[in-house]
Image: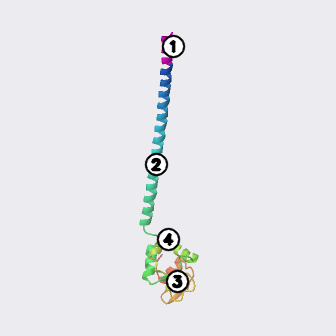
Amino acid sequence: MDEQALTRHDRIRIQQEQRNSERDAALKDKESRAKRRRRMIYLISGSVLMLVLVLIGISFAMPGKLDDFAKCLSEKGAVMYGAIEWCKYTKEQAGMFGKSFKYVDYRDYRDGPDVKVTPTWVIGDATYEKVQSLERLSALTGCPL
C-alpha cells in the first residue's frame, strides 16, 4: 500500500508542479506582453514628441508673413516705442506682426522722444500714438503689405 500511496502522492505532486509551471508560464507571458505594450507606448510617444518638435522647428525656421513689410518699415525709419513687458496695447501692436515683429525697429518708451502713450510710432518727423493698423502704417510709410 505504501508504494501505491507514494505513487499516488507522486502523481498528485507532479500534477501540481505541472499546473504551477503552466501558471508561471502564463504569468510570464502576460508580463512579457505588458512589457511589449509599454515599449510600444514609449516608442509611439517618443515618435509623436519628435514629430511635434520637428514641426515646431520648421515653423520657427519659416519666414513670417509680414517679414518684408516689417523690414520695409525699419528701412523707412519707422520706430515703434512701447512697453512690451507690461503694456497690453504694445503687446497687441507687436502681435499684429506675429513672428515678423523681430524686424520692426522697436525701442523701449523710456528711450523715445518724450513718449507719453504706448505704443507710439515715430515716422519721419511725425508721431502717431496708440495702436496703428497695418494698413495705416503702410500708407504712412509707403511700404506694401
> Which residue is farthest front?
2
Which badge, 1 or 2, is on the more N-terminal residue? 1
Query: In terms of depth relative to the viewer, which is nearer, 112 or 132?
Result: 112
Q: Which residues are magenta?
A: 1-11
The mark nearer the N terminus, 4 or 2, is: 2
Q: Which residue position is annotated with label 1? A: 5
Q: Amino acid at mark 1?
A: Ala
Mark 1 and mark 4 residues within 8 Å of each other at the beta carbon: no
Q: Which residue is mark 4?
A: 98
Residue picked out by circle 2: 42
Q: Pointers 4 and 3 in contact (CB under 8 A)?
A: no
For the point 54% across and 85% down, which residue is it?
128
* Prevailing SS of the magenta stretch: helix
Q: Position of residue 55 (x, y in %)?
A: 44, 59
For the residues labelled 4 and 3, the Cα–Cα distance comes to: 20 Å
Measured Cα–Cα span from mark 1 to mark 2: 55 Å
- In the image, 111 versus 104, the foreground residue is 111
Between marks 4 and 2, how big is the CA–CA gap?
35 Å
**At which x and y percent is residue 105?**
46, 80
